[in-house]
Image (spheres, rainbow, N blue to C red):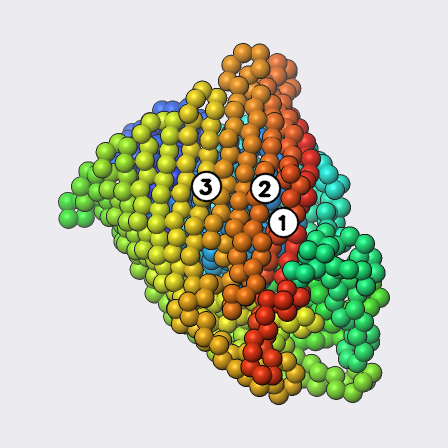
């Protein structure tokens, strides 16, 4: 649910996990300027009794935040389809949020979300298992997850991209399709429900009228990288559409990391009557990629890019130990290239939304989404194979008026989503091309969520706004895991072992926010909110050693967070924002890597209590004509306040020892992250459109284990970009833009991803030290060495 910013005299607040539309005061706490789209009403105007829309240009413009816009007579008066789409699900009033607009990444290579989300404070990114599979973390929420995205909810034009089991993946997100990205930071389950312990993201595609024709672009560079993409959009009468398609491929900079991926993203909106709007969404992504093996820290220092790893035995090359016969007995260590590790996945999302205005103050919205994730993932000693179809339905009503004589916006919504799937885990065996052996396990799973949400926004005074919300949700997890053992050497007779789970969780999440506009320059904001996240069914069936087993005692994690901050906008050239936060977690779900050769790559446990605190700063300063400085900085301090970890000596029947982790830093959390950019764009004269910028990215070192014995090294990177855009005098062409960028100018070798690793203990009860942990595999991917990338884009009429 995302409320809308002010649009002329209309103010909309979007609520409900994917489709809630509410009028709102303006975005109160974004560090960067709000992106608004104003346009005249379409020809199918409302009756004269309704107030007309404010006339404005049909183009994106930047305006400073405003807390108290003039009330509108109708929620949708003056809203054309393109405007409604552009405003859907932007940062809600009362939340801590940032909007990244297209101007911040349109003139550079933007292959994955890692290239654009760094512009927001609170965001941390790490390379996942695939070229665009980026682990996105808000306030450290997902930094300790082994793969994919957890602990935040993702939308695409308000349609959910997070499936009912809480898993999101960024493979299907091509940044070139989008006009803006909203980043919501902090616990937000009152608005977004299950899994929103860290916040939410909404990717907004470009309005068709802003494209107004066809654009073709191509970019390419080192390591065989080539990306062709197409954008088309138009508004014809009461119908508006935008279509994006791309094909990207590369040889990869790490051994066995070539890929090709295709993405299609379509959005169409029909303003059928003055009171009814219909929106259709379609996304499809196909991914075919080979995958390298995650290294130990020692291997990373020896051979970070896994060169020469055609055969096992080369220094620094990771290996997987595969059963020769595909089910038991003798194993052979093979490199990723020898085994043929990789992914061949498809993701398809189809959604529809109907908005109906009962009158000038009441709007009803209904939305349905079908989301199918089909996977074939031989990523290690085993391969995951399965189809995960899900269904998501939401309905809500928004009423605008007065309450106790105060301007009021009231929202109430209900939702239901479900995912049922059966997936196999099969052994990978020698033979190349990810040859499959016998079945290691099968998991049947069912995840369902249903609940209601309510929200009230009151203007207590002309400069004081209060927001209160609450969400209630029931989550039902059911599953049966059947694991297979083959006790007789070279005899493929399986003995099944069943572990079942039937868990039900009920969670309630309240929130309260106050916004005080001290004067036109200063906005003060305070917020207290809660979040919750249930485990996935698959987490219930993996033990600490990475074997299929019983982990069904897992609990839902909950957090209570306090935010206090301000936005300072002394003039149109400077915007500065600071937010301090303190969050208290109970039963935090923490994921760490399992021992090498285990059937499952990660294990999840509950840490009883932990505390997360930090500071987020954002600045946007146009200090001289043509010059612009932007910065996003995050400080995180996260540690256990109640957690005793049990470690077992390796081997069957090994003794168990307990270790107190209270006061230890939570692994995977970098305490300092900064992205800063200084750029210049020539605004007039014969060189108008020519620009350049230099960018610095800094990520501090962080612990990789619960005992805080081993650290992943930090890094500083420098990027340099030069770009040029010009309008063209032609019957067919509108404009041309080109760019050239050097990534990692000083060719630093750095850690792009380091999954948490498990501590180990000796028979004497002494923990193994950092030297031993540095040899633990399954953790590290190196980042790209210096790369040169050039691109060109043509816009056709």
The Cα–Cα distance between marks 3 and 1, rounded to whole angstroms, is 20 Å
Q: Is residue 23 visible?
A: no
> In the depicted view, which residue is nearer to us: 415 or 338?
338
Q: Residues within 10 Å of mark 2 (few under 14, many from 20)?
A: some
* Labels 3 and 1: the sequence-earlier one: 3
Residue highlighted by disc 1: 750
Q: Is residue 672 above or below residue 242?
A: below
Q: In this orientation, which residue lies closer to the viewer: 316 or 213?
A: 316
- Quote the CA–CA distance across marks 2 and 3: 15 Å
Q: Quadrant of residue 339?
A: bottom right
User: Could you tell which of marks 1 and 2 lies nearer the N-terminus?
Assistant: 2
Which quadrant of the figure has residue 83?
top left
| Residue at 61%, 27% in the rendered image | 722
Quadrant location of the C terminus? top right
Q: Is residue 115 visible?
A: yes
Q: Which residue is mark 2?
A: 717
**Left or right, residue 458 beside residue 136:** left
Secondary-structure class at tag 2: strand
Q: Is residue 706 left or right of residue 339?
A: left
State the count of labels: 3
Q: Nearer the viewer, residue 213 or 291?
A: 291
The residue under the point 52% across, 82% down is 657
Q: Residue 344, how many percent across, how many down?
A: 71, 56
Graded by Cα atoms within 10 Å as few (under 14), some (14 to 19) or many (20 or more), the crowding at tag 1 reads many
Q: Picture coordinates of residue 325 (x, y %)?
A: 82, 76
Q: Position of residue 211 (x, y in %)?
A: 55, 29
Q: Which residue is mark 3?
A: 632
């Amino acid at each position: 649910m995302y409320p809308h910013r002010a649009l002329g005299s209309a103010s909309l607040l979007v609520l409900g996990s994917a489709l809630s539309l509410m009028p709102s005061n303006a975005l109160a706490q974004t560090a960067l300027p709000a992106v608004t789209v104003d346009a005249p009403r379409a020809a199918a105007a409302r009756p004269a009794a309704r107030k007309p829309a404010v006339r404005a240009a049909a183009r994106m413009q930047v305006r400073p935040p405003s807390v108290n816009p003039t009330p509108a007579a109708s929620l949708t008066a003056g809203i054309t389809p393109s405007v409604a789409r552009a405003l859907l699900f932007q940062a809600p009033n009362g939340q801590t949020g940032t909007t990244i607009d297209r101007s911040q990444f349109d003139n550079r290579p933007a292959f994955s979300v890692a290239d654009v989300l760094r512009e927001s404070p609170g965001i941390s990114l790490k390379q996942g298992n695939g070229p665009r599979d980026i682990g996105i973390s808000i306030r450290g929420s997902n930094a300790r997850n082994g793969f994919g995205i957890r602990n935040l909810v993702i939308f695409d034009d308000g349609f959910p991209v997070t499936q009912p089991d809480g898993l999101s993946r960024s493979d299907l997100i091509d940044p070139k399709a989008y006009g803006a990205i909203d980043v919501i930071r902090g616990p937000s389950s009152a608005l977004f429900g299950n899994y929103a312990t860290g916040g939410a993201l909404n990717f907004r595609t470009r309005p068709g009228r802003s494209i107004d024709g066809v654009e073709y672009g191509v970019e390419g560079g080192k390591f065989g990288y080539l990306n062709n993409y197409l954008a088309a959009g138009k508004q014809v009468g009461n119908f508006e559409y935008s279509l994006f398609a791309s094909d990207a491929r590369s040889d990869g900079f790490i051994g066995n990391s070539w890929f090709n991926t295709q993405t299609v993203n379509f959005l169409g909106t029909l303003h059928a009557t003055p009171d009814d709007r219909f929106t259709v969404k379609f996304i499809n992504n196909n991914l075919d990629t080979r995958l390298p093996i995650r290294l130990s820290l020692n291997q990373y220092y020896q051979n970070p890019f896994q060169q020469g790893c055609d055969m096992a035995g080369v220094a620094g090359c990771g290996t997987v130990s595969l059963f020769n016969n595909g089910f038991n007995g003798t194993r052979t260590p093979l490199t990723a290239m020898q085994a043929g590790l990789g992914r061949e996945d498809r993701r398809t999302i189809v959604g529809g939304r109907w908005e109906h205005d009962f009158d000038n103050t009441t709007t009803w919205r209904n939305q349905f989404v079908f989301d199918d994730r089909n996977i074939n993932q031989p990523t290690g000693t085993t391969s995951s194979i399965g189809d995960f179809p899900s269904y998501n339905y939401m309905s809500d009503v928004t009423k605008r008026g007065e309450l106790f004589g105060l301007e009021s916006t009231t929202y109430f919504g209900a939702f239901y989503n479900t995912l049922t799937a059966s997936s196999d885990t099969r052994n990978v065996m020698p033979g190349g091309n990810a040859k499959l052996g016998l079945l290691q396990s099968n998991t049947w799973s069912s995840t369902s969520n249903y609940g209601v949400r309510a929200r009230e926004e009151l203007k207590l005074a002309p400069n004081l706004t209060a927001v209160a919300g609450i969400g209630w949700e029931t989550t039902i997890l059911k599953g049966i895991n059947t694991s297979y053992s083959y006790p007789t050497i070279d005899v493929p007779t399986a003995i099944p072992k069943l572990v079942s789970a039937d868990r039900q969780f009920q969670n309630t999440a309240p929130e309260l926010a106050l916004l005080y506009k001290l004067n036109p320059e200063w906005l003060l904001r305070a917020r207290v909110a809660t979040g919750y996240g249930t485990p996935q069914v698959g987490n219930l069936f993996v033990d600490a050693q990475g074997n299929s087993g019983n982990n069904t005692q897992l609990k839902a994690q909950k957090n209570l967070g306090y935010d206090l901050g301000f936005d300072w906008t002394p003039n149109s050239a400077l915007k500065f924002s600071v937010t301090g936060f303190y969050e208290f977690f109970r039963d935090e779900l923490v994921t760490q890597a399992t021992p090498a050769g285990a059937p499952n790559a990660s294990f999840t446990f509950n840490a009883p209590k932990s505390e997360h605190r930090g500071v987020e700063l954002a600045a946007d300063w146009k200090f001289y004509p043509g010059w612009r400085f932007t910065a996003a900085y995050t400080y995180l301090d996260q540690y256990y306040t109640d957690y005793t970890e049990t470690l077992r000596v390796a081997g069957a029947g090994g003794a168990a020892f307990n270790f107190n982790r209270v006061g230890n830093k939570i692994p995977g959390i970098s305490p300092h992250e900064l992205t800063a950019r200084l750029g210049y764009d020539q605004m007039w004269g014969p060189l108008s459109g020519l620009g350049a910028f230099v960018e610095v990215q800094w990520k501090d070192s962080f612990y990789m284990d619960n005992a805080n014995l081993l650290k992943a090294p930090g890094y500083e990177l420098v990027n340099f970009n030069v770009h040029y855009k010009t309008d063209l005098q032609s019957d067919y062409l509108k404009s041309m833009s080109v760019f050239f960028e050097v990534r990692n100018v000083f060719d630093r070798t750095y850690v792009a991803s380091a999954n948490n690793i498990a501590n180990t203990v000796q028979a004497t009860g002494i923990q193994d030290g950092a030297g031993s942990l540095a040899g633990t595999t399954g953790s590290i991917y190196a980042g790209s060495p210096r790369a040169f990338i050039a691109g060109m884009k043509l816009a056709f009429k």
